[in-house]
């Protein structure tokens, strides 16, 4: 009987121990690296997955030496409840392309989970020579490579200096695949060019051909360039990461084709144009760099007025060319006219063929004396690239007549004795003494002892003592208030990152990084917690302990989740604005409860 009782107790102890072990295993944190293959050809791709069973922060991937990252990191999260137990999995995925043959080690990645740092185990990969695929079967990446082409079409390869050149970037897509999204990787800076983007408001697919094969194409970007330097100039390439759905040979339950998503980096390549200098033969002396086809005029708002009234003289150049890149000629006005600095006006539109419109300088002129004032004709010269010749235009001569007003001194001298002379009548008080009693005193030395300065300097140290004591205590209070200083610093950081998020609206990656940092630093200020303690579960528990409304807690946690997911998913400008407004609303609600 005693033996039976002992066996029962031993059995219960083993069950309890095994249950504790299972519970411990369920709570064990794992962070692993998985490879799609350990041996591959140099023409194949490698998939690397970093998987964890609890959410973490500050994920740092390895350097991927001897590999090129062609896609990633893409992020996937799965969470479920089974028999009352929660299972969680989060994976960062990279697609790598080897750059050399040999045995290479993919080093460890790190992440912080629950305040501790976890690392993966390094793994070795063997890269061999290019492998042949059975029956010439193409991979998803091969299909994407053959089906996507980014082309930069240049309107002129041999323009003149300051002549318009249009660059149109077209993405050619095979009908066999579908483009889901794209993002720019490297935008050209157009060095040695004056550039003006022409917005593409709608991406409409059109039918075309590429290397003799039927393709669809979409215009992604248009830009007008005006070369500012002669010689061989390079147009830097535009690089994009394109996300596409590629059909596979597999079928779903209903017989439909199964598609696989992948990404490809495409580049328009460097383009070189030969910019010709403007000819020196026949160049006018007044030429200021205008290139195009223009009209020129000088007009005035009136040609008759009275003295002290004003008129407007307008110098206008209109037409097609580099309207923003040269100076307008200045009218030659008589020195007796008062002329104000001109007001510059522009009415210019930029089309795919270049700038068109007009530029105007408005001069305000005020005559002071009666008379006639001629405004002589002035020249304006430009180079016409269509004819390869210089053209000089002249404005019309304008005569301004001032009807009423005083006569200038020059006219008085010209009339001589006919002008009435005014006599100076003495009043007897033309001269006055400046000061009769100067109150002069002899220069002598003054004693410092007993003077006003002496007593001021004597009292100053006694006045400074209480000020120094008050300042010292204030500094000590500020220095001792460690928590208050941290809260002030975190508040400043929260404002900084929220303002950065607002500034980065439209740039998805930068916006959500700034928004997430702003949310983190706000809670650091309010709850006085460190970053290492900053998990969603801990935040939820603390906010519940502060008796915050469940709806507001879910809103805050939902924003953090949205920040994590949005960086790896296509989000629109409207969605980003909604998330920013929601963040401001949630912070406002939490402020009233914390």
Image (cartoon, helix red, strand yellow):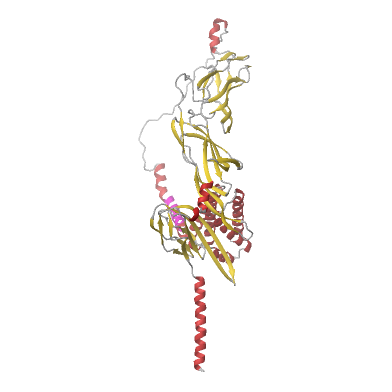
Q: Magenta-highlighted stretch: main secondary structure?
A: helix
Q: Tell me which corner region of the image, top left, top right, bottom left or bottom right, holds residue 205.
A: top right
What residue occupies the far bottom of the structure in this picture?
1
Tell me, yes or no, whether the highlighted magenta stretch contains residue 465: yes
> What residue lies at 49% left-to-right and 18% top-to-bottom?
431
Give whichever of 372, 559 is nearer the camera: 559
Position in image of residue 149 (x %, y %): 52, 44
Tell me if 64 is positioned left or right of 409 in this view. Answer: left
Q: Quick check: 576 above or below 209?
A: below
Name the spot of residue 508 as percent of width and height, x first.
55, 50
Across and down, in percent, residue 277 comes to: 45, 26
| Furthest-top residue in this view | 417
Quarter of the image for the C terminus: give it: bottom right
Left or right, residue 42 beside residue 506: left
Q: What stretch of residues is rendered in magenta?
A: 462-477
Can residue 423 be seen in the rendering of this structure?
no
């Amino acid at each position: 009987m005693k033996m039976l009782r002992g066996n029962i107790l031993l059995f219960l102890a083993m069950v309890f121990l095994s249950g504790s072990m299972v519970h411990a295993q369920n709570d064990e944190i794992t962070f692993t690296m998985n490879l799609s293959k350990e041996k591959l050809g140099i023409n194949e791709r490698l998939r690397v997955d970093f998987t964890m069973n609890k959410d973490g922060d500050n994920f740092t991937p390895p350097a991927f030496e001897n590999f090129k990252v062609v896609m990633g990191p893409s992020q996937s999260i799965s969470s479920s409840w089974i028999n009352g137990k929660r299972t969680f999995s989060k994976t960062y995925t990279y697609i790598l392309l080897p750059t050399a043959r040999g045995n290479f080690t993919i080093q460890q990645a790190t992440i912080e989970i629950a305040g501790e740092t976890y690392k993966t185990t390094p793994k070795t990969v063997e890269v061999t020579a290019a492998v042949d695929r059975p029956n010439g079967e193409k991979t998803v990446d091969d299909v994407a490579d053959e089906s996507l082409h980014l082309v930069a079409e240049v309107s002129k390869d041999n323009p003149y200096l300051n002549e318009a050149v249009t660059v149109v970037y077209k993405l050619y897509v095979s009908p066999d695949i579908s483009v889901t999204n794209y993002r720019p990787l490297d935008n050209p800076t157009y060095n040695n060019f004056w550039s003006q983007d022409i917005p593409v408001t709608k991406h409409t697919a059109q039918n075309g051909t590429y290397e003799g094969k039927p393709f669809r194409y979409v215009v992604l970007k248009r830009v007008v360039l005006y070369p500012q330097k002669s010689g061989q100039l390079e147009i830097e390439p535009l690089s994009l990461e394109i996300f596409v759905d590629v059909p596979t040979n597999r079928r779903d339950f209903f017989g439909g084709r199964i598609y696989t998503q992948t990404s490809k980096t495409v580049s328009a390549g460097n383009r070189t144009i030969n910019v010709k200098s403007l000819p020196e033969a026949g160049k006018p002396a007044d030429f200021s760099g205008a290139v195009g086809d223009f009209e020129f005029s000088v007009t005035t708002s009136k040609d008759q007025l009275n003295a002290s009234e004003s008129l407007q003289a307008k110098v206008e150049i209109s037409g097609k060319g580099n309207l923003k890149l040269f100076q307008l000629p200045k009218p030659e006005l008589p020195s007796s006219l008062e002329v104000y600095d001109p007001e510059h006006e522009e009415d210019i539109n930029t089309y795919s063929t270049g700038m068109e419109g007009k530029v105007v300088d408005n001069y305000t002129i005020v005559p002071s004396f009666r008379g006639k004032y001629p405004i002589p004709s002035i020249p304006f010269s430009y180079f016409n690239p269509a004819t390869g010749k210089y053209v000089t235009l002249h404005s019309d001569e304008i005569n301004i007549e001032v009807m009423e007003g005083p006569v200038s001194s020059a006219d008085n001298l010209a009339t001589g004795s006919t002008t009435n002379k005014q006599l100076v009548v003495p009043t007897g008080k033309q001269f006055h003494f400046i000061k009769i009693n100067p109150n002069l005193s002899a220069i002598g030395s003054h004693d410092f002892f007993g003077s006003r300065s002496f007593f001021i300097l004597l009292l100053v140290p006694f006045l400074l003592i209480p000020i120094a004591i008050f300042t010292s205590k204030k500094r000590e209070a500020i220095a001792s208030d460690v928590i208050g200083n941290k809260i002030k610093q975190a508040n400043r950081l929260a404002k900084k990152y929220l303002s950065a998020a607002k500034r980065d609206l439209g740039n998805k990656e930068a916006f959500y990084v700034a928004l997430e940092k702003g949310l983190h630093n706000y809670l650091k200020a309010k709850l006085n917690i460190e970053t290492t303690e900053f998990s969603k579960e801990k935040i939820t528990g603390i906010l519940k302990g502060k008796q915050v409304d469940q709806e507001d807690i879910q809103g805050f946690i939902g924003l953090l989740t949205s920040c994590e997911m949005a960086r790896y998913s296509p989000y629109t400008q409207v969605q980003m604005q909604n998330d920013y407004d929601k963040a401001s609303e949630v912070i406002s609600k939490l402020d009233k409860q914390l």
